[in-house]
Amino acid sequence: MDEKTEATGKPLEAAEPGEVEKPSEIEEPAPVEKPDYGIDAPAVLRNFFLAGAACVVGGLLLPHELHLGPVTFKLYAALFWTGGFLLAEGLLYLLYVKKGKLKHRDYMLSLHEWKGDEQVLDVGCGRGLLMIGAAKRLTPGGTGKAIGIDVWSNVDMGSNSPEATQLNMEIEGVEGRCKVMNCTAQSMVFAKNSFDVVVSNLCLHNIYNKAEREEALGEIVRVLRPGGVALISDYKLTREYAKRLKAMGLTVERKMGNVLATFPPLAVVVARKPTALP
């Protein structure tokens, strides 16, 4: 068969003199959609950068020194150091939002030995970071289920909504193992002893009243099955959580997260409910 003839026997079209034959176009695969777990406390991140930038600009525009009687203030140095410090904090916080919280999620979930059939509750699930991470550790098609509850505040999580969480579930391929509900931590709708694992990250400190925080902790203990574990992470008040959970009969330990991956540094309260506790 002639080298300019296809396997079908049809002649190939010859290129015009001086024309370079173009290879057939290869269809590029569609871009893979990635989950968006949002920005925690977006106003805090914004304020770090705005305040830092304002200090740097002030250091450039204002007099380098301010004299008040015999006292001289070095404005230039003070404003530049403060601005640099705030901008550095903003960058560290942005690094946590984009990368660090994924590592912290994996660390938290590694504190439980997964069997694949657990019933899991994420208190203050936001866009589903912990809930989806737990669902990935459940056996597909099995009895395990991960439920996330939230009140969908856009102050505590940027663009927070059940729809955004549902989209992340679908992108991660775990929508069959997850469910989200509108519910407060202080008054859960679940029956007693419903969950093997309860997780929560950066949620309980947003309950400003101590008595209400204790109600939320009491609800976590109520819905946790005997032998189950609660993993509660926060940047403050973790000693308070640990003390309260211990007073309710749980075995409690407090572990620090990776200080290089979290900003501000996060601690995890690991509370196990004894099998004999009702």
Image (cartoon, rainbow, N blue to C red):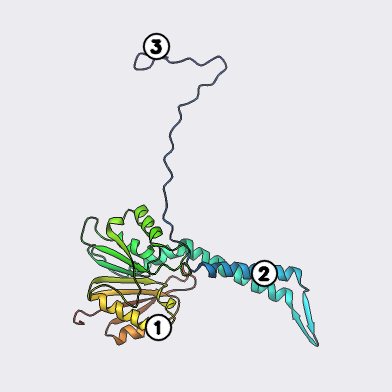
Q: Amino acid at mark 2?
A: Ala
* Tag 2–tag 1 contact (CB < 8 Å): no
* Quarter of image, res 43: bottom right
Circle 2 is placed at which residue position? 54
Q: Which mark is residue 239?
A: 1
The residue depicted at 23 percent of the width and 64 percent of the height is 115
170 is higher (above) or lower (below) than 192: above
* Tag 3–tag 1 contact (CB < 8 Å): no
Residue 226 shows in this picture:
no
Single out the mark in the foreground, 2 or 1.
Answer: 2
Q: CA distance from mark 2 to mark 1?
A: 36 Å
Circle 1 packing at 10 Å, graded few (<14), some (14-19), many (20+), is some
Circle 3 is placed at which residue position? 2
207 is higher (above) or lower (below) than 6: below
Which quadrant is the N terminus positioned in?
top left
The residue depicted at 41 percent of the width and 73 percent of the height is 203
Give the image location of residue 247, x and y in percent. Answer: 30, 87
Give the image location of residue 199, x and y in percent. Answer: 33, 71
Secondary structure under the numbered disc 1 in the rendered image: helix
